[in-house]
Image (tube, rainbow, N blue to C red):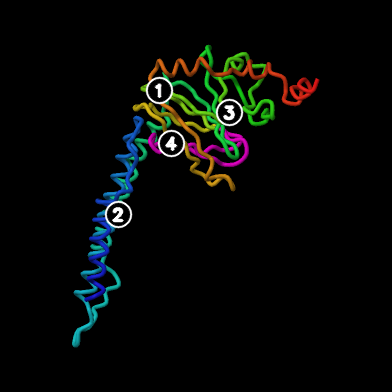
Amino acid sequence: MKTALVLVLVAVGSVVFHLLSPWWWTPIASNWHYIDGTIEITFWITGVVFTAIVLFTAYCVWRFRHREGNTADYKPENKRLEGWLTIATAVGVAAMLAPGLVVWAQFVTVPDDATEVEVLGQQWQWSYRLPGQDGKLGTASTQAVTAENPFGIHADDPAGQDDILIQGGELHLPIDKPVKILLRAVDVLHDFYVPQFRAKMDMIPGSVTYYWFTPTRTGTFEVLCAELCGTGHPYMRGTVIVDAQADYDAWLAQQTTYSQVSALPAPADREVAAAK
């Protein structure tokens, strides 16, 4: 009887805890409310199944407890019960997977009017590259990364000369404009994650992954790395600021382009010049 009561308390306590828990999602700041909906569907399905199983176990512990004179009835098979359990399980799994597949199709289908923004992850900082006046990013590769060219931009590509470079600073985005985030990593796996945007993706060295979102709320949001990327992983944080269009344009006009950076003398040359 005590065991059955404990099981009932576990089921009821779990439901109450999740309904009253202070640890919930941050307020959403992008178009991906679909992801919240998918998570909620999974939560309710698994929650109902968990509660039903625990309560059923409690019932069985109480109903079939040991009593003098009772004899256990052993039934190795029950095809009817197995059939219903198979159907119920299939329906439950399909109900959890189907919304996710629909959302995933939307997640990787980028709108035609989305602006490309490249995020470069390296131990242990974030860097960003935005298109310049021509509206497109120049080609780049990990093999071309050097101390003087940390983004690995191909100098012979004219489209890259006006690319705007932000190394270790804040990324600004305009509100209500779709953005395609191109993700690159220089050294190990990273994962660019802003909880309020409900979107993230692994960054794989040698590859370019992507996702897209539309910022829907102005404000300052923290960037986290969602992959364990080394000893400095907890400190790999950054900032994304969503601006009104006028504020974004003013910020963009103050940034430095690749051609301006590449025209500067190398650090060693500047030290020699300063010594003279």
- Measure the alpha-carbon separation of dots 3 and 2: 50 Å
Given this view, does label 2 or label 1 mark the residue nearer the observer?
A: 1
Query: What is the magenta range?
Result: 184-207
Mark 4 or mark 2: which comes first in sequence? 2
Given this view, does label 4 or label 2 mark the residue nearer the observer?
A: 4
Given this view, does label 3 or label 4 mark the residue nearer the observer?
A: 3
Residue 262 vs residue 1, the one in the foreground: 262
Q: Which residue is mark 4?
A: 194
Mark 1 or mark 3: which comes first in sequence? 3
Q: Is residue 144 above or below residue 56?
A: above
Q: Which residue is mark 3?
A: 167
Mark 3 or mark 4: which comes first in sequence? 3
- Measure the alpha-carbon separation of dots 1 and 4: 16 Å
Badge 4 marks a residue whose secondary structure is strand
Q: Assign the C terminus to one quadrant of the image.
A: top right
The amino acid marked with disc number 1 is Asp
